[in-house]
Image (tube, rainbow, N blue to C red):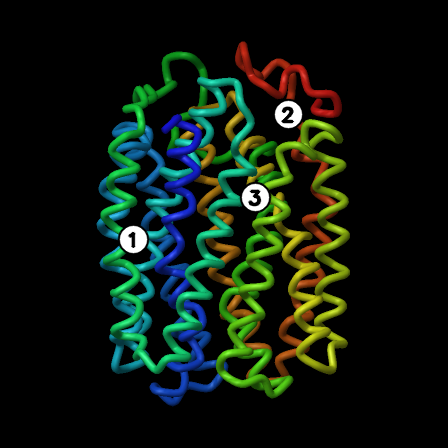
């Protein structure tokens, strides 16, 4: 199997177990007797784990390489993602989610650095397609989770079962990846150290991606609750919201590399951003499950290509190593993904769920305004970079 296909397989396998957790969030909420605000506090464990992990993960991944990162990360992740379903109190749920957030961020950083290394070494655009496989993986996981819930298998059995099945396949795929050379520190060449403050160019990319991933996180954690509590969907139908969303994210990402080659990164991001805003608007006025599912689908298309485009833009910056820049971007992206659900939960607790979801409109508008930051500079492109000959990429 080619290195491109192995990378895509690793992207697909990583989120499957986490996806199987998402449809079970309402069950855990009910078991622990949590309201929207209580669940929001517990969900803060995920971003806390990210906050504690990513500042250290960038230098580590740059030193040991993405292959070793994935071999270690998949093991830690498979254990950590199984823990939240075992929680017996809100505090334990918070701590379990914190461990899961740390493992997820470390593993996903390795995946993004691996995809960037493949693009640079082979001259083929795979970043968006790889993230398409990630979306397909989390959609698969959510469908598996919904199916296991439908047959009555308890969450504390179902999620570890999925993780145990996926782990050996993920380790086998990761072992076959090439051992990418580690990246040296750049203090001798005038580039920024990994621990230095991000450049203005990187900050713009980070602010762009925050709104995108905040929306993704909101769909992951609140879609089932929204369909159940606002529109009265039953357990099986409530899980379809995220499945539809993830399916359209995957579809957008599978076509993202071709669309980027034809139109360029910035026009593609602008068109997708408009779709995201339209999708949220549909969701806010939806009066039935069918219309809500259309809203989830349009939102999925709208946010599909944002993060892959941002990863490529961040990795192309020349102020420091690509692993350090991607680590900072991943930190902000995961922060958006994991902070979105608690913010919406706090709003929903005091107002209502629709108003909570309306908080996505301003952050998506900011992302749309910052799409120009995704332009890559010709001087920062290495020899053989596939984007060098693509019309519309500046």
Q: Residue at x 61, y 13 (%)?
A: 379
Position of residue 55 measured from the top left corner of the image (x, y, whole percent): 36, 43
Position of residue 306 measured from the top left corner of the image (x, y, whole percent): 62, 44
Asked if the residues shown at circle 1 and circle 3 are in contact, with their CB atoms under 8 angstroms apart, the answer is no
Question: Relative to 76, is 171 above or below?
Answer: above
In depth, the one of 329 and 103 nearer the eye is 103
Left or right relative to 80: residue 228: right
* Residue where numbered disc 2 is placed: 376
**10 Å crowding of disc 1: few (<14), some (14-19), many (20+):** some
- In the rendered image, is residue 99 in sight? no
- Give the number of the mark in front: 1 or 2: 1
**10 Å crowding of disc 3: few (<14), some (14-19), many (20+):** many
Position of residue 168 measured from the top left corner of the image (x, y, whole percent): 23, 47
In depth, the one of 170 and 200 nearer the eye is 170
Give the residue at the far top of this rendering: 383
How far apart in space, not on screen, are marks 1 and 2 (Cα)? Answer: 36 Å
Q: Residue at x 51, y 43 (%)?
A: 131
Mark 1 secondary-structure assignment: helix
Closer to the N terminus: mark 1 or mark 2? Answer: 1
* Residue where numbered disc 3 is placed: 307
* Residue where numbered disc 1 is placed: 166
In the picture, the quarter occupied by the N terminus is top left
Left or right relative to 23: residue 265: right
Position of residue 180 measured from the top left corner of the image (x, y, whole percent): 32, 23
Q: Quadrant of residue 64?
A: top left
How far apart in space, not on screen, are marks 3 and 2 (Cα)? Answer: 15 Å
Q: Quadrant of residue 346?
A: bottom right
**10 Å crowding of disc 2: few (<14), some (14-19), many (20+):** many
Q: Residue at x 72, y 30 (%)?
A: 264
- Give the number of the mark in front: 1 or 3: 1
């Amino acid at each position: 199997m080619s290195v491109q296909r192995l990378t895509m397989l690793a992207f697909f396998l990583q989120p499957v177990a986490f996806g199987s957790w998402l449809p079970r969030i309402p069950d855990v909420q009910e078991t622990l007797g949590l309201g929207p605000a209580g669940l929001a506090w517990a969900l803060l464990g995920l971003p806390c784990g990210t906050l504690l992990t990513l500042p250290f993960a960038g230098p580590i991944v740059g030193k040991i390489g993405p292959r070793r990162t994935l071999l270690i990360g998949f093991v830690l992740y498979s254990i950590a993602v199984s823990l939240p379903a075992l929680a017996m109190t809100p505090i334990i749920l918070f701590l379990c989610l914190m461990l899961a957030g740390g493992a997820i961020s470390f593993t996903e950083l390795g995946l993004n650095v691996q995809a960037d290394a493949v693009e640079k070494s082979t001259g083929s655009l795979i970043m968006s397609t790889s993230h398409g496989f990630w979306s397909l993986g989390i959609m698969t996981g959510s469908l598996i989770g919904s199916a296991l819930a439908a047959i009555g298998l308890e969450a504390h059995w179902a999620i570890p079962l999925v993780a145990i099945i996926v782990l050996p396949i993920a380790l086998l795929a990761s072992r076959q990846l090439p051992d990418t050379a580690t990246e040296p520190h750049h203090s001798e060449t005038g580039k920024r150290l990994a621990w230095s403050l991000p450049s203005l160019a990187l900050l713009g990319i980070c602010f762009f991606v925050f709104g995108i991933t905040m929306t993704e996180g909101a769909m992951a954690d609140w879609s089932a609750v929204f369909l159940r509590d606002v529109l009265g969907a039953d357990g099986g139908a409530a899980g379809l919201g995220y499945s539809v969303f993830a399916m359209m994210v995957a579809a957008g990402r599978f076509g993202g590399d071709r669309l980027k080659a034809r139109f360029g990164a910035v026009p593609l991001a602008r068109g997708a951003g408009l779709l995201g805003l339209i999708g949220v608007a549909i969701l806010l006025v939806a009066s039935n499950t069918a219309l809500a599912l259309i809203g989830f689908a349009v939102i999925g298309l709208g946010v599909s290509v944002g993060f892959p485009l941002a990863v490529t833009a961040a990795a192309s910056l020349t102020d420091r190593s690509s692993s350090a820049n991607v680590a900072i971007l991943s930190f902000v992206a995961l922060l958006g993904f994991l902070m979105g659900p608690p913010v919406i939960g706090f709003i929903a607790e005091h107002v209502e769920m629709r108003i909570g979801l309306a908080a996505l409109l301003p952050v998506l508008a900011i992302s749309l305004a910052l799409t120009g930051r995704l332009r890559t500079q010709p001087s920062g492109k290495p020899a053989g970079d596939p984007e060098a000959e693509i019309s519309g990429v500046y």
